Amino acid sequence: MDRNKYILVFLLIVVTSFSNVLLANIPNFSPIASVALFSGFYLSNKKVAIIIPIACMLISDYFIGFHSLMWAVYLSFSAIVMLGFFMKKANGKLIILNSIFSAVLFFIVTNFAVWATGSFYPKDLTGLLSCFTMGIPFFKYTLLSAIIFSLILFGGYEWFNQLVNKYLTATKRT
């Protein structure tokens, strides 16, 4: 199953990178947070698990464009991978809860970075709250994409494993 896992991960990188480019016109609607959570949960090699979402972002950012706060985006996805490390099992409830937490984590890290490093908002509590308030319209897309893509990834992976197991079982009988 390890070989199948890595084939699936490779396909995941390619598909995610290009889907991130295709979905670029919808603000913050991206599968990368879900890929980060998925990688953290399923990949035992923690370095590879962190590299997966970063690689997806680097590839898609090459086409979409880089900006000065990419470090915050990459940092938040690395933290989401770590969240996946601590998931005990992959059932619907935990996937949805961790997807919500992933979206909130991304929102907090990236909006804090905008406030802390930019000149748009005063460097006080009012400025911080204003920054978070201005980010709320984008949060709905972050949240929606995290839930949708996590359910697709985790569900698709389980479906793929069942399909492979059925195939292997059928070939052993013959």
Image (spheres, rainbow, N blue to C red):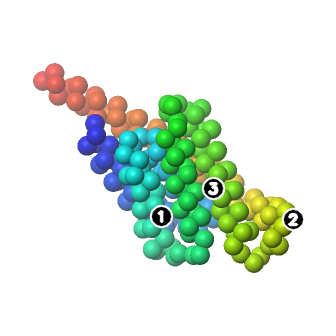
Who comes first in sequence, dot 3 or dot 1?
A: 1
Dot 2: few (<14), some (14–19), or many (≥20) neighbours within 10 Å?
A: few
Rendered image: mark on residue 57 = 1
Residue 41, given in percent of the width and then of the height, sits at: 46, 40
Q: Is residue 12 visible?
A: no
SS type, badge 2: helix
Closest to the camera, between mark 2 and mark 3, is 2
- Residue 120 falls in image quadrant: bottom right
Dot 1: few (<14), some (14–19), or many (≥20) neighbours within 10 Å?
A: many
Q: Which residue is mark 3?
A: 106
Along the line of sight, the residue nearer the viewer: 107 or 25 = 107
- Vertical placement of residue 138 versus 65, above or below: above
The answer to whether residue 68 is left or right of residue 169 is right
Rendered image: mark on residue 148 = none
Who comes first in sequence, dot 2 or dot 3?
A: 3
Closest to the camera, between mark 1 and mark 2, is 2
SS type, badge 3: helix
